[in-house]
Amino acid sequence: MLQPVILSGGSGTRLWPASRETYPKQLLPLTGEDSLLQITAQRLNGFSADIAKPIVVTNEEHRFIIAEQMRQIGQPSDRIVLEPVGRNTAPAMQLAALIATQEGGDPVLLVMPADQIVTNTPAFHAAMSEGLKQAESGALVTFGIVPDRAETGYGYLRTGDIMPGASSASSASSASSARALAAFVEKPDAARAAEYVASGQYLWNAGIFMMRASVWLKALAALAPEIAAACQASVNEARRDTDFIRVNKAAFTACPSNSIDYAVMEQLGTHPELGQAVVVPMDAGWSDVGAWDALWAVCDKDSAGNVTQGDVMLEDTADSLIFAQSRLVATVGIKDLIVVETPDAIMVADKSRAQDVKKIVTRIKAEG
Ligand code: GDD
Ligand code: MG
């Protein structure tokens, strides 16, 4: 049994003003009709495996939107796990693992961030089925993307030898073969990131993980016992309210905050007893839509290279992203700009400065 787990706890500040704490980027229809959350859940449609209903881990505030969006795509979740506070991804995955095994069984968890785009679904499925073979035999599986720049916001995976049982790379399938994960380095500094990219031995960590629930539970108990204990206590005292599972507030609030990457994946190299770490290379048009320029890069464009949404009128405008939510937005003679209009805020930015949008959000929070 494959158990999808969707992590939907972030707020996506670099996609302000469309993305807000009350309505974060993963719940927005940024690339068309469906939200990133909906696209994520639908990405498994047609994947040939026995797939359970997804577990979604999120916070109290987004519960109704999430329930509704999952219903809209015909994939109602019967387990929407509500965190009283964000404690990063390791506790979120731990809650999902505990809940997935509550009724016995040992499903393979497929943990996916709710805010990514994958344009080549068949290639994604091929990578997932390669990962599934490895995960079923006890491996902790990551998925690797060929890097095209020295991005410091990602994890880096050093690839080792081809795994036994891996698909042949020359087969018709577009998935490459599973390899041993020789090292995992989360968010290296710029110099090291550049070195890794130049070496040709590293892939970016896609942020998607696959492993048996029992393998994860054992690894987390060994590497982050305080997280394991706090999550166990918060699930023991959880309250179920139809499809919502509210974990105990006091117990979860006491949980240390850490990510899957730092708490577990980086540590595996020195703990071979916890299982084989594996990387499956994935060439599937992956993007994590971190900022407006990344969204522009993955969306379909008009003949002048523009990505638009809503009521827009463009005159001599090129290579720009123009989103209008509530009014007509008109542009004349511009290039490489991001223009985002919402009822209460308008943002205009140079496309090359898309990362700095978070500075505005920080100022709004500080200055009120
Ligand atoms: N439920 C829940 N609770 N979800 C969370 C929480 C939380 O406290 N914190 C983050 N998430 C969700 C985010 O919404 C996102 O979908 C996913 O978990 C990953 O968290 P990010 O905060 O976006 O991680 P990152 O981008 O810094 O790094 C991760 O992803 C990169 C690829 O996009 C790492 O896995 C990197 O190694 C990786 O390269
Ligand atoms: Mg991210």
Image: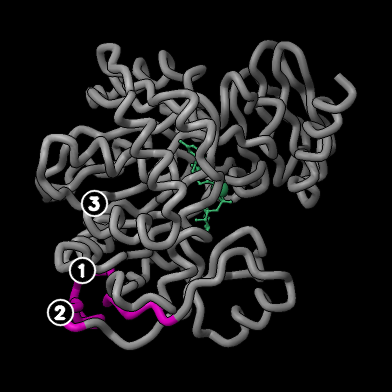
Q: Is residue 173 above or below residue 21?
A: below
Where residue 145 appears, x then y in whole percent?
46, 67
Where residue 14 appears, x then y in whole percent?
69, 39
CA separation, marks 3 and 1? 14 Å
Q: Is mark 2 within 8 Å of ligand 1?
A: no
Q: Is residue 242 above or below residue 238?
A: above
Span of residues in magenta? 164-182
Residue 42, quarter of the rendered image: top left
Residue 190, quarter of the rendered image: bottom right
Residue 181 part of the magenta-drawn span: yes
Q: Which residue is mark 2?
A: 165
| SS type, badge 3 | helix
Nearer the camera: disc 3 or disc 2? 3
Q: Quadrant of the C terminus?
A: top right
**Residue ID at (32%, 73%):** 278
CA separation, marks 2 and 1? 8 Å
One can see residue 50 in this view:
yes
Which amino acid, by three-letter code, is at mark 3? Ala
Q: Earlier in the sequence, mark 3 or mark 2?
A: 2
Q: Is residue 151 above or below residue 312?
A: below
Q: Which residue is mark 1?
A: 134
